[in-house]
Amino acid sequence: MKRHALGLLATVLGAALPFAAVRSAAPSLPAESRVPGGIALIELGSTAAEPGQVFFNGHRTPVVRSGEIWTAVVGIPLDIVPGPQAARFVRADGQGTRDLAFEVTPKLYAEQRLTVQDQRQVDPNEADLERIDREQARIDRALSIFSTDLTPPWQMTTPVPGRRSSSFGLRRFFNGQSRKPHSGMDIAAPTGTPIVNPAAGRVVEAGDFFFNGNTVFVDHGLGVVTMYCHLSRIDVKPGETIAAGRQLGLVGATGRVTGPHLHWGIGVNRAMVDPVLFLPPEAQAPPAAGR
C-alpha cells in the first residue's frame, strides 16, 4: 500500500498550550503561534527595499513590510518535530545567506473519532490509491505556488457563517483507524450554503478529489493559498482572477465526510496552518466542540 494515501497519523508530543499562547501581531500580519501548524514571525530589519528571500523546508516564505520593519511569515508544518528550527535567509543581492533561528513549542492536539459509511474512504482499493496519488500531485502543485503579482491580506473572515464543528490539528481516527491530523477548520453549514471568497486571488485548481470531494484552491500571493473542500457545487474555474466576496461554490458533503460542512484550509510556504491565525482578534476564540 502506498504510504501517504492512508495518511498515517504523526503524533505531536508535549504538553498542551493554553489558547493565550497565540500572540497578536500588527494588523497587517497574522497572529503568531510557534507550534506545529502555527506561524513564526521573524523580523528581518528595516530597509527601503526588500532585504532578501527566506526559505523554510525548501519552500519560499512571504516577506512583508509592516511599518518600517520587514518580516518573514513562516508557516510551520503540523508534522514538524518541536524544538530548534531555522529558516534560511538569502540576501537580495545573492551575496550571502544566514540562518534565522526560532523555537517550535510542543502542542498536544485533541483527538477526534469519526465514523464514515463508505469503508473505501478509510481503506481505499488499488484503483483508489492510484487516483489518490495523482490527486496528491495536483494538491502539492496548488499549495506550492508562489506568486509575486498578488498580495495576500493577513486578516480574513470565515467563508461561511456557522459553528466551527472540528478544530485544526485534531488527531483523527476514522472507523477506529488513525489518519493524518486535521489540517483545516471545519464549519458546519447546511448543504447549499454559499461559500464566499475571503480575499482576492486567482483560482489555481478545482475539481473532485477522493478524500476532499469537490475542492477549490485559491492563490492569494507570496505562497499563501486557501482551499475549500466538500462542496456540493463549484462556481469558479482554474485561471480565474476573483475578488473578495466572489461565490466559490456551495457547501456540501462530498468526499470523506460525516455530514455537510466546509473544510477551510490555509497554506503558507506549503505548510497547512491554523486558519484562526488569520481571523480578527475578536474571532480567535476556541471553536465549539463538535462532531
Image (tube, grey):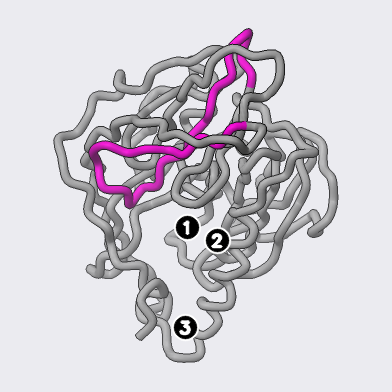
Label 2 and label 3: CA atoms lie apart by 21 Å
Residue 69 vertical position relative to residue 263 in the rendered view, above or below = above
Residue that lies at the very extreme toward the right in this rendered image = 240
Q: Quadrant of residue 29?
A: top right
The residue at which mark 1 appears reads as 259
Left or right, 141 with respect to 98, comes to right
Q: Tags 2 and 1 in contact by the CB under 8 Å rule?
A: yes
Q: Is residue 139 magenta?
A: no
Q: Earlier in the sequence, mark 2 or mark 1?
A: 2
Q: Which mark is residue 129?
A: 3
Residue at 71% over, 34% down: 199
Residue 97 position, x and y percent, is 50, 36
The residue at which mark 2 appears reads as 253
Mark 2 surroundings within 10 Å by alpha-carbon count, few (fewer than 14), some (14 through 19), many (20 or more): many
Residue span colored magenta: 65-91
Residue in the foreground of this view, choosing between 285 and 55? 55
Task: Say which element carries label 2.
Answer: loop
Left or right, 116 with respect to 91, comes to left
Task: Say which element carries label 3.
Answer: helix
